[in-house]
Structures are given as structure tokens and as C-alpha cells.
Amino acid sequence: MTAPVVLLTGASGVVGSALLRTLSREGTPVIALTHHKPAAGTTVGGDITRPWLGLPPADYRELAATVDVVLHCAARVSFGAAAHSLHHVNVRGVGHVLRFVEDAGARLVHSSTAFVARNGPDTALASYADSKAAGETLVRASGLPAAVARISAVIGDTRTGEIARLQAFHHVVGMAMWGQLPFLPCETGTRVDIVPVDVVAAALAALARDEEARGDYWLTAGPAALPMRRIIDLGYEIAAARVRADRDLPALDLSLLKPHLVAPQTFDAIVSSVCAAAGTGHPPSVFRHLTGLMASFNGFDPFPTSLGTIPGGPPALSEDSVTNALLAMFRHLASLPRTTWGSRQQ
């Protein structure tokens, strides 16, 4: 049986780059639609925000005649982006991709976010989740053969902890593990759902192979999500080991610097009081976003998960496998320059 030809958008992104490696390793014929950044293998320069994917008519027709499955991973992911900017890529871009899927007679695997199920005005993800929810609506309304993959917060590779670009979660726990985050707006017992990027890539590749894949799939830790307190403790285990092994780092008991988990209202009051006393007026960027970021986790039941049910896909995550992936992530973070945690990148 001939392997389907895959068109991959967003091949230079966090998920897309891992997916491109997975598809190439499996021998799947893949064409990466690139825009600003290059990608390995066979590529076509285009732009999902433009009609015909930004391609000349002849190139568009040739591509449509070649492709069997579209893996759509291109998206604008930013807490600080304006709603119209997010809409431009995450909604209008989806419309252009859907037109291509129809013209190609192809199937679609559409990457979305699990946080569409936890969206609200108090979360830092609100505008982004709104745009992704609108993209999902377009996919469903199209009537085309499509699977929607709702992906949770992504961390690095299961074994190495490496990732193409650090995410907001990395900056939060990276600051915490080095004692730069004295308080965290986190309700008692809050579990944080994270999923390794290689697991996401394996699941998406399996959905691309499954000709019957339709509807929503949750690429999440689900019931294996760990409490935030446990995650912070794991980070301190790695940071303490690094301090003991590195003579260039000052000897200190990092456990004394573990952040206190406090109610979000208490956190906001503390930050406001400190800023007022310091005369700075506005808190640093990381603190402005922290309450909103944690609002996407605080007080929620676990996500459902489809891992372990996708034919040919990865098994469901367990608390042990999540713990091991987090330890790999923290080892990777500990290897980075300490200046990495001076400010949160968006």
C-alpha cells in the first residue's frame, strides 16, 4: 500500500518540527509548506493567510494533485498578540487550508488546543483560545473529512527534554526552580496537564495514517496530570543536583527558595503591594501574565485524553511517564544559561 503524501504546515514550529522528524523517520512522503523559516526535506514556499496558500496557480494545482493528507500545524501562538492578528492566521488561514483540502480531495488533521475547553475572560489564553475555537468551527462546518487534535501544554522530548522553542510553562518552572518566583497563583491540588512534544508528534502522525480518523482527539495527559506542587518539587531536585555538582554555583539550600502556592487573589495583592512599595507602578511581564496563565489550570477537572486509543498511536501517559518527561525537561532547563530566566519570552 502506497504511503499517503502529507502536506505539513507550520513545519518550523514547536509541534511541526517534531512532527516533520517523526514523519521523515517513518518514511512518510512529506512536503513542508514554509513561510518565514526554512524546514528540512521537500519544501514549498507559501502563506496560509493568502488565497491559494500564496502559491502561483500552476504550483497550487500541482500541489493539490499530489497531496493526500494535510497536517495543519501552522498557528499564531502569543498571549500578547491582538485579536485581529490571531484571527488572521488562526481563522482566516484555516479557511484557506480548508479550500486546499477540498481542491486536493484530501483529508485534514487540524492541530488545535485543549484549552478551548477552559477558555474564559480571566485566562491569559483567552484571545488565542477564541481564535482556535473559531478555527475548529470552520473545520466542522466544512463537512470535509477531518480530525481535530486538541493539544495540551507542550514540553520537550520525553528522553532529552529538548524543544524547538521554550514555552510559557518552561519560563514559569524555570524561574521557580532557581528561586526567582517566590509566589505562584495556584490553588491547592491544581494539576497541570502537560504532554511531551514527541508524544504529540507520534499521535498526529498516527492520525494522518488513519483514513477513518474523524472528530475530536485529545492529546493530553488526562488523569496522569501531576499536581503543580509535585512539578515544582521535581524542578528543585534537579536544580539542587546541579548546584551540588557545579563548583561555579554558590552553595545554598534551594529548598528555602521554593515558591509558595497561594490563592490567585492573594498573589495579585502581594504583587500590587510590592510594586507600590517599590514605586514601579506595573509588575514585570512574567507577573502580569502569571495569574492568567494559571487560571487555565486552577480548579479544573482533568482533560479527557485520546492517547492510547488512536490506532498505531502512542500509549496513554501515566504519572510515571509524565514524571520522567518532566525530569528530562528540568535537566534540559538546568543546562541553559541562568540568564535565560531573567524575563519571560512571549
Image (cartoon, helix red, strand yellow):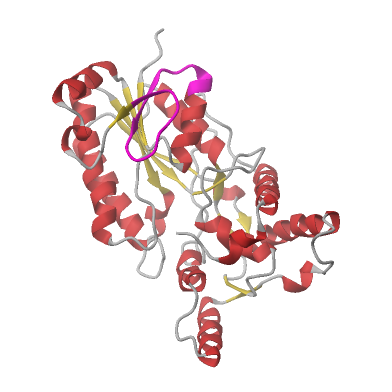
Q: The C terminus lies in which quarter of the figure?
A: bottom left
Q: The N terminus lies in which quarter of the figure?
A: top left
Q: Which percent across, then down, holds residue 179?
A: 69, 69
Q: In this rendering, would 279 be left or right of 106?
A: right
Q: Is residue 295 above or below residue 160?
A: below
Q: Is residue 214 above or below residue 292?
A: above
Q: Which percent across, then down, holds residue 215?
A: 34, 36
Q: Which residues are magenta?
A: 24-43
For residue 327, say whether it is visible. yes
Q: In this rendering, would 250 be left or right of 72?
A: right
Q: Residue furthest left?
A: 57
Residue at figure coordinates x 65%, y 48% from the top left: 329
Quadrant of the image occupied by residue 328: top right
Q: Which percent across, then down, holds residue 283?
A: 49, 79
Quadrant of the image occupied by residue 139: top left
For residue 229, say whether it is visible. no
Residue 38 is covered by the magenta coloring: yes
In depth, the one of 274 and 247 nearer the eye is 247
Q: Residue furthest front?
A: 248
Q: Residue furthest top?
A: 1
Residue at figure coordinates x 45%, y 32% from the top left: 204
Quadrant of the image occupied by residue 122: bottom left
Q: In this rendering, would 251 be left or right of 88?
A: right
Q: Is residue 127 above or below residue 93?
A: below
